[in-house]
């Protein structure tokens, strides 16, 4: 009940492959006897090599770039079929039983019933109308976690053919075409997204996605939450300090994250899971 | 066009945020005379924070779940011990709320500080803080993993961020919980609002 059974990845060959990848990426923690390869399978996950995340907005105390260790990221966002397996195994996350504290009243609102996704929610489409709490619970159940903002943004900064998407005209065209379109009533299959440089699909162009630390986004217009924000960096001349003022989509993601509460659900917000490239044994 | 989309997106989530506290309340759990049978989420009300699975450690090094506070009126804030500006004010404000309470409620209330700083605020560091600030046994000082801290912050609506220098930017929020662990009041900011918080605490304690 706690973890999904996955048969594929316990083969020695797979482990060897994962080991080689990890070594290549330099992510095996040196000298720590507790550090081992994550024993869980990584089927459907993609290794994102270590890199630097340049925050869109920073406070005076923030570093200009945040180093991100190599990690594994789901190739696809979590689908309705996958989420159905989760709520089937965990009754308290069913639509009729979840506490309003953890998911608002539109949680899984496009599903036909507790255990019936129905015609608005095809099996292969990304699950939406899920709260941060639900996404986190799913990830834990799957033996994974939600990606951090820095991890998600690092993976999403890649273009189709190169690690830096800023100069990828095809990616930009697709991204802005998506932003200009209303969210369709029935979402496309998650696997239809064109893979980016790392082989991850659907980071742009399908749905927005929860990140684990969404509640670090401090720009809310509420004075109580704006502590620490460097207004000189944010306003006026300061927008020059934003990573890239042409990265309109990044501003939208920042605005979305800072507007959300952890129990909110919307028709265009889903999630995918991540995992450390190495794991500590308890 | 894009701006309109963004506004729609934001207003939809904002509208939703407002209706959160209005959800129906289930009857209080039976048998709240005994606090400590940590057995059952099922006995917590639907809006009780005590349903959360977050695990903490007290400054005495004892494992602690928030459900242990059930049955007591609670004033709770998140903080970090090395904070030089807002957190001392928050602690003073909670002390001020405490001083305003009638004795019958004051004596059974719990005053809870949960640290953002899972690295530096070890149970020992929190014990130190307790001694420095002369906080008596009605104060509960909690250390949690990053995971637990983030979950509690999400439940409270607290935003926080570890800065490069190890300090934290954070919302300044004092939260009042009724004996079932439901949020009945939040004081935001660093000035004013103490009478309202006190009134809410008294009302919730009856």
Image (cartoon, helix red, strand yellow):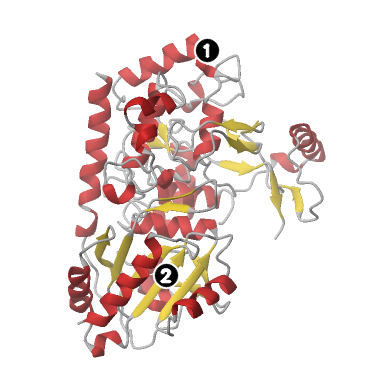
Residue A157 percent across, percent down from the top left: 53, 24
Chain name for mark 1: A
Residue B3 percent across, percent down from the top left: 25, 23
Q: Residue at x 46, y 46 (%)?
A: A213
Q: Is residue A241 above or below residue A33?
A: above
Few, some or many C-alpha atoms within 10 Å of disc 1 (few <14, some 14-19, many ≥20)?
few
Q: What residue is disc 2 on?
A: B113
Residue A44 percent across, percent down from the top left: 61, 34
A8 or B84: nearer the viewer = B84
B64 or A141: nearer the viewer = B64
Distance between the Cα atoms at labels 2 and 1?
48 Å
SS for callout 1? helix
Q: Residue A167, which numbered label?
A: 1
Chain name for mark 2: B
Q: Is residue A78 among what the camera can see?
A: yes
Q: Residue at x 48, y 10 (%)?
A: A170
Q: Is residue B103 left or right of residue B84?
A: left
Q: Is residue B152 above or below residue A46?
A: below
Q: Is residue B10 above or below residue B199?
A: above
Residue A54 percent across, percent down from the top left: 53, 31
Q: Is residue A100 above or below residue B101?
A: above
Q: Residue at x 41, y 27 (%)?
A: A250
Q: Is residue B105 left or right of residue B89?
A: left
**Residues under numbered marks 2 and 1 in contact, where contact means CB atoms less than 8 Å apart:** no
Determine the image quadrant of residue A174: top left
Few, some or many C-alpha atoms within 10 Å of disc 2 (few <14, some 14-19, many ≥20)?
many
Q: Residue at x 58, y 77 (%)?
A: B61
Classify the position of the N terminus of chain A by image quarter.
Answer: bottom right
């Amino acid at each position: 009940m706690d973890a999904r059974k996955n048969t594929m990845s316990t083969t020695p060959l797979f482990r060897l492959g994962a080991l080689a990848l990890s070594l290549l990426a330099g992510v095996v923690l040196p000298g720590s006897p507790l550090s081992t390869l994550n024993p869980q399978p990584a089927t459907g996950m993609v290794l994102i090599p270590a890199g630097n995340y340049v925050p869109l907005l920073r406070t005076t105390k923030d570093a200009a770039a945040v180093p991100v260790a190599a990690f594994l990221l789901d190739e696809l966002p979590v689908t309705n079929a996958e989420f159905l397996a989760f709520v089937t195994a965990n009754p308290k996350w069913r639509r009729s039983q979840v506490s309003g504290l953890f998911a608002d009243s539109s949680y899984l609102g496009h599903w036909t019933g507790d255990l019936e996704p129905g015609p608005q929610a095809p099996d292969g489409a990304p699950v939406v109308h899920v709260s941060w709490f639900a996404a986190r619970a799913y990830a834990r159940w799957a033996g994974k976690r939600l990606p951090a903002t820095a991890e998600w943004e690092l993976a999403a900064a890649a273009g189709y053919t190169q690690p830096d998407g800023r100069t990828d005209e095809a990616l930009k065209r697709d991204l802005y075409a998506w932003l200009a379109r209303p969210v369709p009533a029935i979402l496309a299959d998650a696997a239809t997204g064109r893979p980016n440089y790392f082989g991850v699909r659907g980071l742009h162009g399908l749905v927005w996605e929860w990140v684990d630390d969404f509640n670090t986004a401090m720009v809310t217009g509420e004075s109580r939450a704006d502590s620490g924000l460097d207004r000189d960096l944010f306003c006026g001349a300061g927008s020059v300090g934003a990573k890239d003022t042409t990265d309109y989509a990044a501003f939208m993601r920042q605005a979305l994250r800072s507007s959300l509460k952890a129990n909110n659900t919307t028709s265009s917000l889903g999630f995918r899971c991540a995992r450390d490239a190495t794991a500590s044994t308890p | 066009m894009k701006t309109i989309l963004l506004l729609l997106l934001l207003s939809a989530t904002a509208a939703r945020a407002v209706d959160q506290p209005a959800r129906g309340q289930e009857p209080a759990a039976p048998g709240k005379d005994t606090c400590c049978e940590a057995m059952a989420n099922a006995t917590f009300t639907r809006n009780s924070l005590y349903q959360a699975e977050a695990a903490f450690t007290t400054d005495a090094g004892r494992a602690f779940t928030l459900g242990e506070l059930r049955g007591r009126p609670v004033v709770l804030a998140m903080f970090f011990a090395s904070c030089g500006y807002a957190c001392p004010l928050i602690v003073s404000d909670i002390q001020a709320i405490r001083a305003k309470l009638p004795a019958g409620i004051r004596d059974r209330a719990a005053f809870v500080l949960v640290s953002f700083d899972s690295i530096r605020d070890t149970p020992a560091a929190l014990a130190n803080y307790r001694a420095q600030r002369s906080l008596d046994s009605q104060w509960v000082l909690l250390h949690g993993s990053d995971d637990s801290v983030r979950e509690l912050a999400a439940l409270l609506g607290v935003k926080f961020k570890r800065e490069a220098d190890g300090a934290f930017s954070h919302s300044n929020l004092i939260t009042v919980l009724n004996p079932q662990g439901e949020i009945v009041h939040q004081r935001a900011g660093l000035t004013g609002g103490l009478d309202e918080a006190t009134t809410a605490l008294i009302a919730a304690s009856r």
